[in-house]
Image (cartoon, coloured by chain):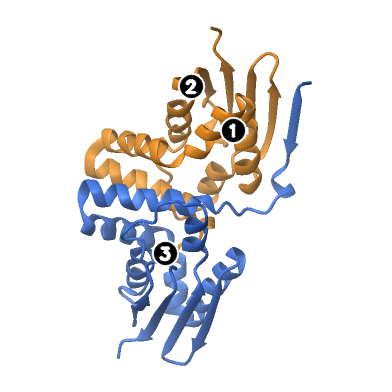
Chain colours: A blue, B orange
Amino acid sequence: MPKQVMNRKAGDNVYLHKDFHGALSNGIDFIHEHYGPEAVRDYLRQFADTFYAPLKKDLVRRGLIALKEHYANVFKIEGGQARFKLTDNELRIEVDLNPAVHHMRAQNYPVARLYSETIRTVGEALCAGTPYAAELSAYDEASGRYTQRFFRKD
Amino acid sequence: MISCTEFIPAYSELFKFLEAKGGRKAVLDFWNYLSDRFLNNLRDLVTANGIRGCWLYWTKSLNEEAADFTMELDEEVGTFSITMHHCPSKGRLMEYRHITPYHDYCGHCDVLYRRVLEPMGYEYNTDLSKCDQAQCSVVIKRKKL
């Protein structure tokens, strides 16, 4: 077999490596096993406070449309299926196909017992210190289908 | 939901979180844990295909990660190499202005893959000296019996 060579530039491919969902799930399991469930939430709050700081500012500046645009883009990129209902005081996201859980189940990767915290805790952290609150009102462990509400607190 | 396109900063923050909790040992423990639990696809491909398994594994992952790289496989000699011209993970971390990457972010690759390949009879050599430019290289060689 002759020597094989592959050259690729960044622009040759679309950035979408869904196995990363499995790596994050393992990270959550590791924290859970070694430091307990509250540490998982602490980690996710730290991540959200750091990484989503610009999104949080956008939420305060433009309101719930900022979150709708963000999550609509996430589901579009990942090929998920979600319905968005936006009013002046509430954003309701009903997820029929959760691309993260769908991918992990398809690959037989373990899904962390606290994987739903990537939705619940991150949503709450996004809203902390803003006029809004978040609630994970339904979550199906097997499929990852969920309903999440973001709403004005007053 | 955290998108897989947002994983790299989540990963970097995870390393920082673990180091604050349990020091460097906690980070290394996690990398070993992840290698043992999550890299079965690399392990299975190398078991089935020898060093070509490395080619098959990284062909999928590096293309999905939209990396800028050169990969070479020489089965007769028993070598596989990656020259990473621009790592998409480290590159993204460096582009974000509002986050500080974990100080040894690139160290995870060395630990994760070495732990799989060395027990299978391969040498794993990596040059991380240009990590701060999102560049690195890896050479994997079949050990002579």
Q: Quadrant of residue A114?
A: bottom left
**Element under label 3?**
helix
Residue B44, labelled with which disc? none
Give the CA separation, mark 3 to mark 1. Answer: 28 Å
**Residue type, numbered disc 1:** Gln
Q: Quadrant of residue B1?
A: bottom left
Chain letter behind tag 1: B
How many neighbours does mark 3 have within 10 angstroms: few (below 14), some (14-19), or many (20 or more)? some
Q: Are the two marked residues, 2 and 3, in contact with CB atoms closer than 8 angstroms?
A: no
Q: Is residue B10 left or right of residue B72?
A: left
What residue is pinned by disc 2?
A: B120
**Element under label 2?**
helix
Look at discs 1 and 2 and give the one toward the viewer: 2
Q: Are the two marked residues, 3 and 1, in contact with CB atoms closer than 8 angstroms?
A: no
What residue is pinned by disc 3?
A: A53
Residue B134 image offset from top left, x and y in percent: 57, 37
Considering only order in the chain, which callout, 2 or 1, is on the residue closer to the N terminus? 2
Of residues B94 and B83, the one nearer the viewer is B83
Residue B135, labelled with which disc? 1
Residue B84 image offset from top left, x and y in percent: 63, 33
Chain letter behind tag 3: A
